[in-house]
Image: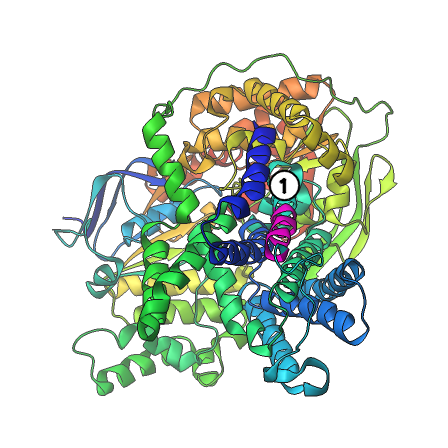
């Protein structure tokens, strides 16, 4: 299916210049391809990882000037200028990625906008190098020495490059890379808890989008043979953004559809030059308000309508949980504790949120952590998972000191968690959300090659996710979007994802809040069966009846201090615990 | 007749049922305590009463009128004023500006009335007078709680509802704030107090409700509740 699609695209690219009624159409097709390429880079950056760059034209221009200058001033051949101009963009993209780690959302948009401006001004004023607004003349065209057929050859090379970029983008979207970027977009701290190194990925995705923008700049420079500084200004930045949004932000073929629409509109509005901005603005408003999914979203709606995909009833029942586990859990063999906290302390602005708490969670037990509102439970959980590093004290996990480890490293060691406020990725299906938790099977390059060769990897990952969903009784919801599901089902989906991480220690943050009694009872039974299979569970929960039923050991904290611990019965009778919850009896 | 009467209230939060069939009454001039462990639904109950959270079913009437369809600001203007959990003072505004935030929205407030109200609050909590020009964020937790109570009182409520005013405060400050609430009811105001610390809250109340997992588990005279061993088990299982 996928290969057929690419084959058809390759044939279309090969045939188009031969059947085009006039050369102008080929030039237009070139323009579409150049815009689409830059838009694919922005689509990955913004649509997947949620980072808005208003400076992509700067990367387009960097590569265009790099290749143009090398070719004109130093007479480099064009095959040699390509890697150099892309390398320039990679470095610039990496620097921008480092900046992006310190700025987010609208601040990042401002920073990238500033980069775009600075680039445009330098290109305009540094006349001795760039030729300024008058332009850099005599840039060789990529025509393979043929004036007659050069435009056709150029289109073939450009079209082939676009196809490759599109395939890479498809791979990113299909694979765990794309799911990881979706997770980063939703919440960086959440991404870390499923083992994604958010900082490195955010930086890398900037590099990738800059290199793709640079590739489009390379082709732009050798299309017309002329480079003027005004080609890389705000107009090109907004054009890329418009193409991505009209096409459908985050969808695989949105950039190409958007580029087609943009160039088509340009042709149309050229006749009404005076009101062209007005027409663009109106169309953008229409898309944003009526079709937020863009052209790709609209096509999907039409397709779903025509083929009437079987939709699941509004409130499907949860099936009984299956007792079969997809894989036996890695039993923690030795008798040493799975998790050990030693005098962990955390302060916020002078307030001691956790005050030298020591804690020991034994292998194969259910250990509950309870305490009144504001006791410090969340702070303690964050210290354990690494989302907020402790100021002092030690945390050992299976004997290894993890006190200084980043959260994604702790997750990879076998520390999985669920969240009090569910963290499901709204733009991924239930099955894809579970796949987010599966450990990595291959490196990115091996993954790409296997993806090209067959769809088996993805099918295997999906099969594993379905098994996990079956284990919690919701495999029939695998292809639904989480937002449409009842709360209890979303909660089970999150539990399945945590199990996908094959954790040694599973941290459950209020696993039954919001569930009905039957659902809560099933979660309770599940916790005990996971324990029986050797998993260790750390539980935070307000429903005391539930806590006392499933726990082997309970630790109580209040005002950041450990005030009691023991078996459920001991804790229930402990006067200090009663006072913490109900106040002083006197 | 009760000043506030809640009947058969069901509230869901993002599709999650939180409260089930809550019946609750507050008589004029009384102090009613609602206690329960965290996660029981206490905050949601207060948010539903002040209309910040939509009720699924059930009725809420205040002073004989159904307020179940009013927007929150209209409820506040009728004299049902909510002091939210975490105090929610405006950090960048001075103490005095914080005090005026609510009251200056009311009809019929001239500057002389506002000055009188300010003077009354500064007399109630002298520490606020000392700090009237300091930004709210610079106050200590206890002072912020006093400011939040005073800001609500500036609106001359007939019913004051408070969400865990004792949270994170030292015991003597909690006693002082609870004492102020008791004082207010003797002046004719009604108070609905939500607390986790059951013993302290029940001791100052006229009647108490214990909620557990979104349902009213017990209610009645404070002495009777305080002596019932079931009170502890509604917290600790």
Chain identity of mark 1: A
- Percent across and percent down for residue B149 are 38, 67
Q: Is residue A558 visible?
A: no
Between B134 and B231, the one nearer to me in the picture: B134
Q: Is residue A12 visible?
A: yes
Q: How many marks?
A: 1
Residue that appears at 73% across and 40% down: A411
- Percent across and percent down for residue A440 are 73, 34
- Residue A219 figure quarter: bottom right
Badge 1: residue crowd in 10 Å (few <14, some 14–19, many ≥20) = some
Q: Which residue is mark 1?
A: A167
> According to the image, what is the colour scheme of the structure?
rainbow
Between B15 and B179, the one nearer to me in the picture: B15
| Start-end of magenta stretch | A150-162
Q: Is residue A58 above or below residue B80?
A: below
- Percent across and percent down for residue A546 are 54, 27
Q: Is residue A238 above or below residue B30?
A: below
- Residue A550 figure quarter: top right
Judge whether residue A151 is colored magenta: yes
Predominant SS of the magenta segment: helix
Residue that appears at 62% across and 74% down: A227
Q: Which of the image's four quarters has the N terminus of chain A?
A: top right
In this rendering, position of residue A377 left or right of residue B107: right
Q: Is residue A405 above or below residue B76?
A: above
Between A195 and B20, the one nearer to me in the picture: A195
In this rendering, position of residue B57 left or right of residue A193: left
SS class, disc 1: helix
Judge whether residue A263 is colored magenta: no
Q: Which residue is outermost to the front?
A: A148
């Amino acid at each position: 299916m996928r290969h057929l699609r690419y084959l058809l695209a390759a044939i279309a690219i090969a045939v188009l210049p031969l059947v085009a009624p006039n050369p102008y159409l080929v030039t237009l097709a070139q323009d579409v391809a150049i815009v689409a390429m830059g838009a694919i880079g922005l689509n990955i950056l913004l649509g997947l990882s949620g980072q808005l760059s208003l400076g992509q034209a700067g990367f387009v221009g960097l590569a265009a000037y790099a290749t143009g200058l090398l070719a004109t001033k130093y007479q480099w051949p064009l095959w040699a200028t390509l890697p150099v101009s892309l390398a320039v963009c990679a470095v610039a993209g990496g620097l921008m990625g480092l900046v992006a780690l310190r700025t987010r959302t609208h601040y990042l948009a401002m920073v990238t906008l500033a980069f775009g401006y600075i680039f445009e001004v330098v290109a305009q004023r540094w006349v001795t190098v760039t030729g300024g607004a008058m332009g850099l003349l005599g840039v060789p065209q990529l025509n393979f020495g043929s004036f007659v057929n050069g435009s056709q050859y150029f289109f073939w090379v450009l079209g082939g490059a676009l196809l490759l970029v599109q395939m890479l983008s498809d791979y990113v979207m299909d694979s765990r890379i794309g799911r990881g970027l979706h997770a980063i977009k939703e919440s960086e701290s959440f991404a870390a808890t499923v083992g994604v190194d958010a900082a490195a990925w955010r930086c890398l995705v900037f590099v990738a989008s800059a290199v793709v923008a640079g590739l489009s700049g390379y082709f732009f420079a050798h299309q017309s043979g002329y480079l003027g500084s005004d080609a890389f200004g705000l107009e090109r930045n907004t054009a890329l953004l418009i193409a991505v949004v009209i096409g459908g932000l985050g969808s695989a073929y949105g950039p190409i559809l958007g580029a087609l629409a943009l160039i088509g509109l340009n042709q149309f509005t050229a006749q009404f030059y005076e009101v062209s901005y007005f027409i663009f603005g109106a169309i953008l408003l229409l898309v944003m308000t009526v079709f937020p999914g863009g052209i790709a979203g609209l096509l999907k709606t039409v397709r779903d309508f025509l083929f009437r995909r079987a939709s699941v009833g509004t409130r499907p029942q949860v099936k009984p949980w299956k007792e079969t586990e997809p894989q036996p859990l890695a039993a923690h063999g030795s008798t040493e504790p799975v998790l050990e906290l030693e005098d962990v302390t955390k302060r916020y602005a002078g307030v001691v949120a956790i005050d030298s708490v020591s804690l020991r969670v034994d292998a194969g037990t259910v250990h509950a952590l309870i305490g009144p509102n504001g006791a410090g439970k969340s702070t303690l959980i964050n210290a354990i998972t690494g989302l907020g590093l402790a100021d002092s004290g030690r945390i050992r996990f299976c004997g290894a000191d993890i006190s200084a480890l980043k959260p994604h490293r702790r997750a990879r060691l076998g520390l999985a968690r669920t969240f009090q406020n569910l963290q499901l990725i709204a733009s991924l299906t239930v099955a894809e959300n579970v796949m987010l938790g599966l450990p990595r099977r291959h490196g990115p390059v091996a993954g790409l090659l296997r993806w090209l060769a067959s769809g088996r990897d993805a099918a295997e990952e999906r099969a594993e996710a379905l098994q996990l969903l079956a284990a919690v009784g919701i495999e029939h919801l695998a292809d639904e979007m989480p937002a449409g599901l009842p709360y209890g089902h979303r909660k089970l989906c999150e539990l399945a994802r945590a199990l996908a991480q094959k954790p040694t220690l599973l941290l459950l943050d209020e696993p039954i809040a919001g569930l009905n009694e039957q659902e809560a009872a099933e979660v309770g039974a599940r916790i005990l069966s996971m324990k029986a299979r050797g998993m260790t569970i750390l539980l935070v929960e307000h429903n005391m009846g539930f806590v006392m039923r499933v726990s082997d050991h309970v630790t109580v904290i209040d005002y950041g201090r450990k005030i009691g611990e023991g078996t459920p019965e001991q804790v229930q009778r402990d006067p200090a615990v009663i006072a913490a919850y109900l106040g002083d009896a006197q | 007749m009760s000043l506030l009467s809640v009947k058969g209230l069901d509230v869901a939060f993002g599709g999650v049922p939180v409260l089930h069939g809550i019946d609750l009454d507050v008589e004029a001039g009384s102090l009613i305590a609602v206690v329960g462990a965290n996660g029981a639904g206490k905050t949601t109950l207060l948010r539903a009463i002040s209309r910040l959270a939509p009720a699924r079913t059930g009725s809420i009437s205040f002073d004989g009128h159904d307020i179940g369809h009013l927007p929150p600001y209209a409820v506040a203007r009728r004299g049902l004023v909510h002091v939210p959990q975490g105090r929610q003072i405006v950090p960048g505004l001075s103490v005095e500006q914080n005090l005026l935030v609510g009251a200056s929205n009311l009809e019929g407030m001239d500057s002389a009335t506002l000055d009188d109200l300010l003077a009354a609050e500064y007399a109630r909590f002298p520490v606020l007078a000392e700090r009237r020009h300091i930004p709210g964020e610079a106050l200590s937790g206890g002072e912020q709680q006093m400011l939040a109570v005073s800001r609500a009182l500036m609106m001359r409520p007939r019913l004051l509802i408070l969400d865990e005013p004792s949270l994170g405060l030292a015991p003597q400050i909690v006693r002082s704030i609870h004492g102020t609430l008791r004082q207010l009811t003797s002046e004719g105001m009604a108070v609905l107090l939500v607390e986790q610390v059951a013993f302290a809250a029940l001791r100052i109340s006229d009647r108490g409700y214990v909620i557990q997992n979104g349902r009213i588990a017990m209610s009645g005279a404070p002495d009777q509740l305080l002596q019932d061993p079931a009170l502890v088990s509604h917290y600790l299982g």
